[in-house]
Image (cartoon, coloured by chain):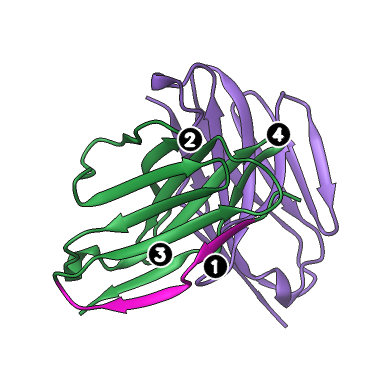
Chain colours: A purple, B green
Amino acid sequence: EDQVTQSPEALRLQEGESSSLNCSYTVSGLRGLFWYRQDPGKGPEFLFTLYSAGEEKEKERLKATLTKKESFLHITAPKPEDSATYLCAVQAVGTQGGSEKLDFGKGMKLTVNP
Amino acid sequence: GAVVSQHPSWVICKSGTSVKIECRSLDFQATTMFWYRQFPKQSLMLMATSNEGSKATYEQGVEKDKFLINHASLTLSTLTVTSAHPEDSSFYICSAQWSAGYTFGSGTRLTVV
């Protein structure tokens, strides 16, 4: 069974204190790994899609990387507005039934204090 | 691009009544839409997958007669919660697949009293 595990479940940082979020996954074959940001009471906001090991993508203070077993979301010099829940999701190759659904991790709540 | 508009953003209804939630893809055609449910401090749980013009595929444990999904056009999918009960209170989110991945609606907070 496909599994997605995010760690830590929650993280508190001081403004400017860089850190990394981990997403480990077990799938029969990876079609894509997705990172989303979710603010309270809102739908997930797309951040990155990674397709193959070694791939990296950056957006402002965020950088996502991918290996064959896990993905990291690096946050450099975070600001209070980066506070949110970060979700990792995987899309597996040959998903049962043909629907290309996403399997989500439980999310990681990030709080950045000023 | 790839915006999904979801309405209403919140709704309160009486127990036993039905509630309809709409999701529209504004600038692309959504062949496939997904409906999720999210409980407080938990991640998204897929309820069903809908394809335009065909019956929805429901995940195990999801009552298809309670959660009616219609995907009659390439830009509109609806979720109707029938005979709602307090335990149906939750945050419902739709998602559509497009060329670059998946985009999500803003969610609907349903409270059944």
Q: How much space separates mark 2 and mark 4, taking CA atoms?
A: 16 Å
Q: Residues within 10 Å of mark 4 (few under 14, many from 20)?
A: few
**Disc nearer the start of the sequence (2/3):** 3
Residues packed near mark 1 inside 10 Å, few (<14), some (14 to 19) or many (20 plus): some
As helix, strand or loop, the secondary structure at mark 1 comes to loop
Q: Which residues are magenta?
A: B4-15
Please tell me which residue is depicted at 55% across the width and 17% down the height of the picture.
Answer: A29
- Residue type, mark 3 in image: Lys
Q: Helix, strand or loop at disc 4?
A: loop
Query: Do tags 2 and 3 sit on the same chain?
Result: yes
Look at mark 3 in the image and give the residue it sits on: B41
Answer left or right for A94 relative to B110: right
* Residue nearest the observer in this picture, B74 or A32: B74
Secondary structure found at label 3:
loop
To the question of a shared chain for discs 1 and 4, the answer is no
| Percent position of residue B75, x then y | 57, 47
Q: Amino acid at mark 1?
A: Lys
Q: CA distance from mark 2 to mark 3?
A: 32 Å
Residue B113 position, x and y percent, is 20, 80
2 vs 1, front mark: 2
Measured as percent of width and height from the top left, residue B82 is found at: 21, 59
Which residue bears the numbered disc 4?
Answer: B99
- At x 48% / y 33%, what residue is drawn? A101
Q: Is residue B44 visible?
A: no
Amino acid, disc 4: Ser
Amino acid at the residue labelled 2: Glu
Return the residue at label 2: B52
Q: How would you rate the neighbour count of disc 2 (Cα within 10 Å): few for under 14, some for 14-19, many for 20 or more?
A: some
Q: Which residue is mark 1?
A: A42
